[in-house]
Image (cartoon, coloured by chain):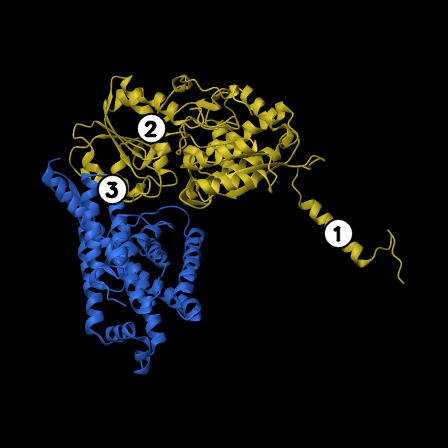
Chain colours: A blue, B yellow
Amino acid sequence: MAFGPFLLLALMEGLVTAAVLSLAAVGLSLVFGVMRVVNVAHGEFFMLGAVIAWFVSTMVPGPAWLAFAAALIVAPVLVAALAAMVDGLVLKRLSYNPEATILATIGVMYMIQQAALSYYGPDARPVLAPFSWRLQLPWFGYSGYKLFVVLAAGLVLLAVWLGLTRSKAGLVMRATQVDREVAQAFGINVGLVYRGVFALGAGLAALGAVLYVPISQAHYLMGHDPLLLSFIVVIIGGLGSLRGTLVAALVIGLSDGVISMFFSPTLAKILATLLVGLVLVFRPQGLFGAKE
Amino acid sequence: MTTTSLFTPSRRRLLQTAGAGLLTSAMPSYVWGQAAPLKIGFQLHRTGIGASYGRWYERTTTAAAAAINAAGGIAGREVQIHYEDDATDPKRGAEVVEKLAGPAGCDLIMGTLFSHVVMGSAPRAGELKIPYLVCSEGYHVASGALNRWVLQPGITDVRQQISAMAPWVAENLGKKVTMIYPDYAFGHDHRDHFPAAIEAQGGEVIAQIAIPPTETSFTRYLPQIPADTEVLYHVMVGPAVLTFVKELGEFYGSGAKPALFGFIDSLEAVDTASPGLEFLEGSHFWEGHCRAKPADAGADETAYRAAVGVDDNGCSVSDAKDVSTYAHMFSCWETLYFIKEAIETSGYSSPADRQKLVEAMEAITDLPAGPERPQGAMVFDGKKHQAFGVQNISKVEGGKLVRVHQTTLEESLYDNATDYTALSF
C-alpha cells in the first residue's frame, strides 16, 4: 500500500482510538475532578454498559438501529442507578476518603466483574451496529460506523462541556469542585452533588461502551483496557480538566494509530507510558490541570 | 428411665435408621468397595480469558468421570475430579498445581489448555513429581521443553496439525501464504513450523504478522498483508477474534481477497453464523473434532455427544445458543480414559507409585478408536509424551462448519530428537 493511503488509514484508526478514549475517560475525569475519588471500578461501568447493550439487543425485536437506540438510553440509566447505589452504600460511608475509596472501588470492580461472569457468561458476544454502511476507498474499505463513533464522541463531549459551563447543575458541580465547604455554606447539597456526579460519570462510561461495543464485542473482562487507558489520558490531560481529557485522548489516539502502523504497536504503548511518566515528573497536575 | 431395645427403639434411633436408609437409596447404583477414591486434580480455566473453554472442559470431564464410574471406576476405585480455577493465569497455574498436589491430595493433575499456563505450571509439577497431563495442543510437550512428568495423551500438537494439513492447503487454496498469529507461545508454534511445511509443498510464506496477545483492534495490521497473498493463514485466540474477522471483512469488502485458512481455536464457543462473521463464508478451518456432526459419524460419536450434552450442531442440548469448544474438549474425555488405562496396567495404588504410573503411560502406544476415543484412533509416542491422530479441515457453508477433508494418522507423524524417557524423574 502506498504511503498516502497508509497514512490516511493510520489517522482514521487513530481518530477512532481517540474517540473511544475520550468517551471512556470523560466520566473518570469528571468524578475525580468534583469528588477527588479515583474510581477504579470505572472500567467495569464501561463493561456493564456493553453487556447491557447486548441484553437489550437480544430483547428488542426489529431492526438493529432500534435496539441500539434503546440501549443508548437503557444502559446509561441502569449503570448510573447502580453507581448511585455504590455511592450511597460504599463511598459515602467512607466519607470519600481518597485512600479508602481506591480500595473500596477495587472491591466493587471485582464484584461487578464476577457478577458479569456469573450472569452473562465468559463468552465474547457481538452487538450489531445500527447500520452497516461501509466506506469503500480505492485502496481499502472502512467501517462507516467507526466514523460515526468519532462524530458521536464529539457530540457527547460537547454536551458534557455545555452542561458544565451553561447549566445550573454544571455551576453547582463546579462550585463543589472548587471548594466543598464553601459550596456547602452557600446551601449546596454536597452529598446530592456527589451522588449525581458519580452516577453521571458511570452513565457516561456506559454510553461510551454502547457506542463502542459494535466495533468490538461485549466481554466480561473488557473493562480493564478502558480503565488503564482512561488513567493514562486523565493523568496526561490533568485530572478534572475536560479540555485536557480531549487533548490527551487526541494525542494518545493519533500517536497510537500512526506509530503502531509505521513502527510497532508495542512502541506506541511504550511511548504513551513514557509520556505519563514525564508528565508525572515535570507537570504532576497534567497538561491542563489546575495547580493545587 | 425409659429403656429401648432393638424391638422398642427410641424415636431418635428410629429416625436415624430411616434417614440412613433414605441416604442409601439415594446412593449411586454402583457401590464402591473399601478402596479410597482416586482423586484427579483438574487445573481449570474457570475465569480469565480461557473461561469459555473452561466451562466445556469441566462439562466434558464431569461426563467422562460419570461414564467411568458407572462402569466400575478406575481399578475398582471411584474417580473424583477436584476442579481448581487457575484464572487462565500462569502464576496462578503454578499455585494451583501446588494446591492440588498438596492440600487437596490429588493422585495426578490434568486438563490445562492455554499454553502460557502450561509453561508456567509444568516446572512446578516436575518439582513436586506429580503426573501433569495437559490438553493444550501446544508443541511445548513434544518439543522436549518440559519435563518427564508432563504428557499430552489426549490431543494432537500444533506441529503435526501443520504438517498434516500443509499439503491440502498448498494444493487447494494457494501457495503464497501470509500468516497472522498471536505473538506468544501458541502463535510461535505456528510461526516456527508452518513455513517449512508449506515450502515442502512448493509454497512459501511471504509475510508473517505477529499481533500482541492483548490487542483489541486489528485494522492497523491489515495493510501489512501483501497484495499478492493467495492464502491468509490466521490463528487468533481470545475474545477479540470477532473484531478481527469483522475488520478483515471491512478492509477487503467487495474487492479481491485471499482465501482464508484458520484454526477453529479462534471461534471455539462462538456461533459461526454470528452477525459480523459473514466474511468467513467459504473459508476453511482446522478442527480437531468436528463441531457439526459429520454424516458418517458412528455410534461412539453419538454416545459421546449425548454424554456431554451436545447436540448435532455442537451446541448445548439445554441451550442452542451455548456453543461448545468442540474441537478441543474431547481431549479431556480421552485423557481421562488414558489415565484409566495407565493406572490399571501399572497397578498404581498410591502417590508413592507415581513414577511407575508415568512409566506405564510411556509404554502405551496404541490408542484405538472406540467409546474412549470418539475423535478417532490415535497413537502415543512415549518418548515425545505426545499423542498423534487425524486432523479435519472444514469449510464454512451457510454459516455452518462442514468437513471437507480428513488427513490420515500417518500424515501427522514427524520426527524430532525428543526423548523424555532418557530424563531422570
The chain that hosts pointer 2 is: B
Residue flagged by tag 3: what amino acid is it?
Leu
Q: Residues within 10 Å of mark 3 (few under 14, many from 20)?
A: few
Q: In what quadrant of the picture does the C terminus of chain B appear?
A: top right
| Quadrant showing the N terminus of chain B | bottom right
| Chain under disc 1 | B
Q: Position of residue B83 (x, y in %)?
A: 54, 42
Task: Please state which of residues A3 and B202 is positioned toward the viewer in this rendering.
Answer: A3
Give the residue pinned by disc 3.
A267
Question: Label 1's element?
Answer: helix
Do the residues marked 1 and 2 share a common chain?
yes
Distance of mark 2 from mark 3, alpha carbons? 24 Å
Q: Which sits in the foreground, B364 or B257?
A: B364
Q: Residue B190 has which mark? A: 2
Q: Nearer the viewer, residue A290 or B33?
A: A290
Q: CA distance from mark 1 to mark 2?
A: 62 Å
C-alpha separation, residue under disc 1 versus residue under disc 3: 72 Å
Q: Quadrant of residue B240?
A: top left
Q: What residue did someone put label 1 on?
A: B18
Residue name at image x 37 percent, y 58 percent? A40
| Residue sitting nearer the eye, B24 or A291 | A291
Q: How many marks?
A: 3
1 or 2: mark nearer the eye = 2
Relative to B29, does residue B148 appear above or below in the rendering? above
Q: Foreground mark, 1 or 3?
A: 3
Q: Residue at x 28, y 48 (%)?
A: A216
Tag 1: residue type?
Ala
Q: State which mark lies toward you, 2 or 3.
A: 3
> Is residue A154 visible in this depiction of the protein?
yes
Task: Say above or below: B261 vs A76.
Answer: above
